[in-house]
Image: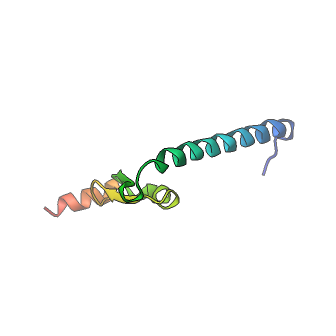
Amino acid sequence: MSCDLPHAATYNANAVAYSQKIKDIDQILRKELAVIPPNKRYMVSCEGVFSYLARDYKLKELYLWAVNSEQQLRLNRSKR
């Protein structure tokens, strides 16, 4: 493992700034979601990769179709 000690302070400062941006976005999202009644909070996507968002923000998750990969989509189409 190599180290870039001369730039460690820059990396650490960037990590702190990035972490703050994520926290800021989280607060904005929570504020925006708070005005939506809990029974109307849905997240619709075409893949299951965003399940963590539904979990973390207490959203009901719906899919345009229940396919999680292009490969799976090809297999399903070939069965017709």
**In the image, residue 33 lies at what x, y percent?**
47, 49
Q: Is residue 15 above or below residue 42?
A: above
| Residue 73 pos. (x, y %) | 27, 57
Q: Colour scheme in the image?
A: rainbow
Q: Is residue 8 left or right of residue 47?
A: right
Which residue is located at x 73 percent, y 38 percent?
14
* 4, 18: nearer the viewer: 18
Q: Is residue 71 left or right of residue 18?
A: left
Question: What residue sits 72% from the left and 42% below the top?
Answer: 15
Considering every residue shown, the one lying at the far left of the view is 80
Quadrant of residue 69 within the rendered picture: bottom left
Q: Nearer the viewer, residue 75 or 37?
A: 37
Q: Is residue 74 left or right of residue 52?
A: left
Residue at image point 78% right, 38% down: 13
Residue at 77 percent across and 39 percent down: it is 11
Residue 34: image x %, image y %?
49, 50
If the image is split into quadrants, where does the C terminus sit?
A: bottom left
| 20 relative to 70, above or below | above
Whether residue 68 is visible here, answered yes or no, is: no
Q: Is residue 37 visible in this depiction of the protein?
A: yes
**Quadrant assignment, res 54:** bottom left
